[in-house]
Image: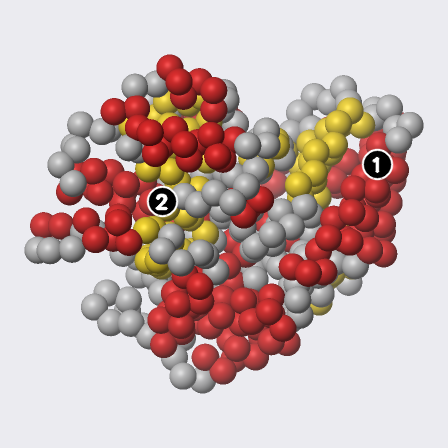
């Protein structure tokens, strides 16, 4: 905060956007290299999503979701369920951001076991390097010192593991759920999980009666090359958290999906009710944006256009790293990439990103890992432009150091 407020700091004030580009208040143009904190999918000011929000605004901007509903929310829930195989994730609970979607999943899981007569299950399993949000329950799952260490004595009972193999040493009869970011941990610095891990988690949960929760807040909606990361291993969870790309990066909206088995446990009298609701849950504008977002996926064949972009990004990253002593490792999953800088002190990444702005790229670093996660609409040429800007920013920063 001191750095932000000091007299010589000039923050970038974003004024407008179009496609993959952002424009600041003084007219500089940047490629949006982190999809506006991993949310934007089809580019800024997409005409279909813009029109859907305007049309909904003519009807109503917001109404209560407590005891009433609205048409966009109904249609969105139906669309979301249809994205998954039949008889899997069949129920939808709408909220407002990724932390809340995870928080809902945790509370549903805990209450589920209370309702089915297993109240002694009290432990949650998560992983080192995890990030699932900043509300207290979601934060309890996290294991990144800078974000979570000072709060770890105040949250939920969570056992953090380094790898799925360590589950064999856990008493599964005490576990409520295993929670994981499938395929890749985002805030850990784009750390990739080994192939087959999701199947291992599914098998262990089934054998021990625990629930499996996938946090697809970051990985959902095409980021990894498929609509959802879990599709790469053909594994379905019992609960799933969605947000960020749900509205195409336009408005706050989240969803927690669960199976019919979990939903049915809550049926009955008021003592079985899932008492959870936010003022803006099921917001009609957000739901209208989300419906338009999903229609763009279909109409523009977004997923079908990803393979050549993913392949091109792979080659472009290889060219960036080749012979560059300032880069130590690159990790990629779909259109998500983490680029490690050599010899950093924890601030080198931010300084390289600041330098890259001068060459037309706006992105962020996690420590000394630069993250490149553009909107899915990015072209091959724009990928090259973005990585060229990053390369120049790195070279200038390291030469000064």
First in residue order: circle 2 vs circle 1: 2
Q: Which residue is mark 1?
A: 318
Does residue 131 show up? no
For disc 1, the neighbor class at 10 Å (few under 14, some 14 to 19, many from 20) is few
Tell me if label 2 and label 1 are in contact, CB under 8 Å. Answer: no
Q: How many marks?
A: 2
Coordinates of residue 102 in the picture (x, y in percent):
38, 44
> In the rendered view, would you say 243 is above or below 106?
below
Residue 173 horizontal side relative to residue 359, left or right: left
Q: Residue at the location (60% across, 69% down)?
A: 298
Q: Residue at the location (11% across, 55% down)?
A: 268
Residue 188 horizontal side relative to residue 351, left or right: left
Q: Residue at the location (49% across, 48% down)?
A: 217
Q: Nearer the viewer, residue 21 or 70?
A: 70
Quadrant placement of the N terminus:
top right
SS category of the residue bearing label 2: loop
Residue 384 horizontal side relative to residue 110, left or right: right
Between marks 2 and 1 in the image, the one whose residue lies nearer the viewer: 2
> In the rendered view, would you say 158 is above or below 41?
above
Coordinates of residue 191 in the picture (x, y in percent):
61, 31
Q: Residue at the location (49% across, 70% down)?
A: 291
Q: Quadrant of residue 64?
A: bottom left
SS category of the residue bearing label 1: helix
Label drawn at residue 238:
2
Task: Give the spatial CA distance, label 2 vs label 1.
Answer: 38 Å
> How is colour applied across the structure in the image?
secondary structure
Q: Quadrant of residue 170?
A: top left
> In the rendered view, would you say 355 is above or below 346?
below
Does residue 4 show up? yes
Coordinates of residue 328 in the picture (x, y in percent):
78, 24
Q: Nearer the viewer, residue 46 or 174?
A: 174
């Amino acid at each position: 905060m001191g750095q932000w407020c000091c007299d010589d700091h000039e923050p970038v004030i974003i004024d407008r956007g179009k496609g993959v580009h952002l424009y600041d208040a003084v007219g500089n143009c940047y490629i949006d290299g982190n999809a506006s904190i991993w949310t934007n999918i089809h580019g800024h000011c997409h005409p279909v999503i813009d029109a859907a929000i305007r049309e909904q605004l003519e009807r109503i901007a917001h109404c209560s979701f407590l005891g009433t509903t609205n048409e966009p929310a109904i249609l969105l829930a139906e669309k979301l369920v249809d994205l998954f195989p039949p008889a899997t994730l069949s129920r939808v609970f709408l909220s407002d951001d990724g932390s809340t979607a995870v928080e809902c999943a945790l509370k549903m899981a805990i209450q589920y076991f209370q309702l089915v007569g297993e109240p002694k299950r009290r432990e949650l399993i998560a992983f080192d390097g995890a990030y699932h949000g900043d509300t207290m329950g979601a934060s309890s799952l996290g294991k990144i010192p800078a974000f979570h260490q000072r709060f770890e004595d105040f949250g939920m009972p969570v056992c953090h593991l380094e790898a799925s193999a360590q589950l064999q040493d856990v008493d599964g009869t005490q576990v409520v759920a295993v929670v994981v970011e499938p395929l890749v941990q985002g805030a850990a610095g784009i750390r990739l999980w080994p192939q087959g891990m999701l199947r291992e988690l599914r098998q262990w949960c089934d054998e021990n009666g625990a629930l499996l929760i996938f946090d697809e807040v970051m990985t959902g909606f095409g980021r990894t090359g498929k609509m959802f990361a879990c599709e790469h291993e053909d594994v379905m969870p019992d609960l799933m958290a969605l947000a960020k790309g749900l509205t195409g990066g336009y408005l706050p909206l989240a969803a927690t999906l669960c199976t019919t088995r979990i939903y049915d446990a809550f049926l009955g009298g008021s003592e079985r009710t899932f008492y959870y609701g936010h003022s803006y849950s099921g917001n009609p504008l957000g739901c209208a944006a989300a419906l338009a977002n999903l229609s763009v996926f279909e109409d523009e064949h977004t997923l079908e256009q990803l393979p050549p972009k993913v392949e091109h990004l792979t080659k472009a990253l290889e060219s960036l790293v080749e012979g560059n002593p300032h880069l130590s490792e690159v990790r990629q999953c779909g259109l998500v990439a983490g680029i490690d800088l050599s010899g950093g002190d924890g601030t080198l990444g931010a300084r390289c990103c600041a330098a890259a702005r001068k060459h037309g790229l706006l992105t962020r670093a996690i420590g000394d890992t630069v993250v490149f996660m553009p909107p899915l609409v990015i072209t091959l040429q724009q990928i090259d432009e973005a990585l060229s800007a990053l390369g120049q920013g790195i070279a200038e920063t390291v030469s000064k150091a």
